Image: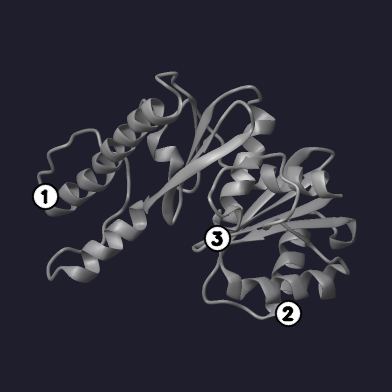
Amino acid sequence: MILCLDIGNTHIHGGVFEENKLILQFRKTTRPLASSDEYGLFLRGVLKENGLSSESIIMISMCSVVPDAIYSIRSACIKYFNISPFQLQAGTRTGLKIKYNNPQDVGADRIANAIAGIELYPNKNFIIIDFGTATTFCIVSKKKEYLGGIILPGLRISMEVLEKKTAKLKAVEIKACDHVVGKTTPESIQSGLYFGHIGIINELKDRIVKEEFQGDVPFSIGTGGFSSLFEDTNLLDVIVPDLALQGLYKALKLNS
């Protein structure tokens, strides 16, 4: 079995693969950061509570956008699994042609998403929209070229800024809305977050189509914690919540 860990700003998203099949997923809040022993005991405990043995893990693949967490989690893998984990980062084999001016600037989680995209949807131009702490776009051509990306504040960040920078606006549940004009202050915030995000994404998608694909509409893949909010809109062709985990699994295979 192979353990994959996507260390994000808000959550550590983990998964276990057995013979190319994802058989377990779990999440842990990233902060506060923990010690190597705390991470190790957590990982072994999650496996045990789901009927899996830590001894059955033969390889570990990880990526991180939180540099401060890497050392402790790597140490936990070595101490509690006797495995030095593979880390997806600049210089590892990806199967992608990175067109960034400096390829090392591309976040490892975005590379994991793109690797999974070319594996799941070969010979397609596609956009990956990851609805996480930030909302990110990855634009990939059918030639396996990572053309570039877009980063904007995510839904939760937007809500937290409203709460912190205003005197009377409070945090609300982030959810899909069925009408745009709110009749209460919480409804108004929810509408602004939801429909505002839809408007931004539609505009960005239109510009990507014109700028990179000469009017040829690419396939749209949604992932990340808030992607399910948009499943009934016209934003996405498919939602793949475990996209980064699949990319980490594929990257490990490419670099083994």
Q: Secondary structure at mark 1?
A: loop
Crowding at mark 1 (Cα within 10 Å: few <14, some 14-19, many 20+): few
Residue 19 visible in the snapshot? yes
- Toward the viewer: 251 or 16? 251
- In 3D space, how far apart are the residues under numbered discs 1 and 2 (Cα atoms)? 47 Å
* Of the image marks 1 and 2, the number of the one nearer the N terminus: 2
Residue 184 badge: 1
Image quadrant in which you'd find residue 99: top right
Residue 63 badge: none
- In 3D space, how far apart are the residues under numbered discs 1 and 3 (Cα atoms)? 33 Å
Q: Residue 228: x and y, percent?
A: 44, 39
Residue designated by label 3: 8
Tell me how many marks there are: 3
Image quadrant in which you'd find residue 77: bottom right
Q: Residue furthest front?
A: 101
Q: Amino acid at mark 1?
A: Thr
What residue is drawn where x is 60% and y is 43%? 113
Q: Amino acid at mark 3?
A: Gly
Residue 130 visible in the snapshot? no
Residue 37 badge: 2
Judge from the rendering whether residue 164 lies leftward or rightward of residue 121; answer left or right. left
User: Which numbered disc, 2 or 3, marks the residue closer to the eye?
Assistant: 3
- In 3D space, how far apart are the residues under numbered discs 2 and 3 (Cα atoms)? 20 Å
* Of the image marks 1 and 3, the number of the one nearer the N terminus: 3
Q: Secondary structure at mark 3?
A: loop
Judge from the rendering whether residue 171 lies leftward or rightward of residue 146; answer left or right. left
Q: Residue 163: x and y, percent?
A: 23, 66
Q: Is residue 7 above or below residue 21?
A: below
Judge from the rendering whether residue 250 lies leftward or rightward of residue 156; answer left or right. right
What residue is drawn where x is 85% and y is 39%? 19
Q: Secondary structure at mark 2?
A: helix
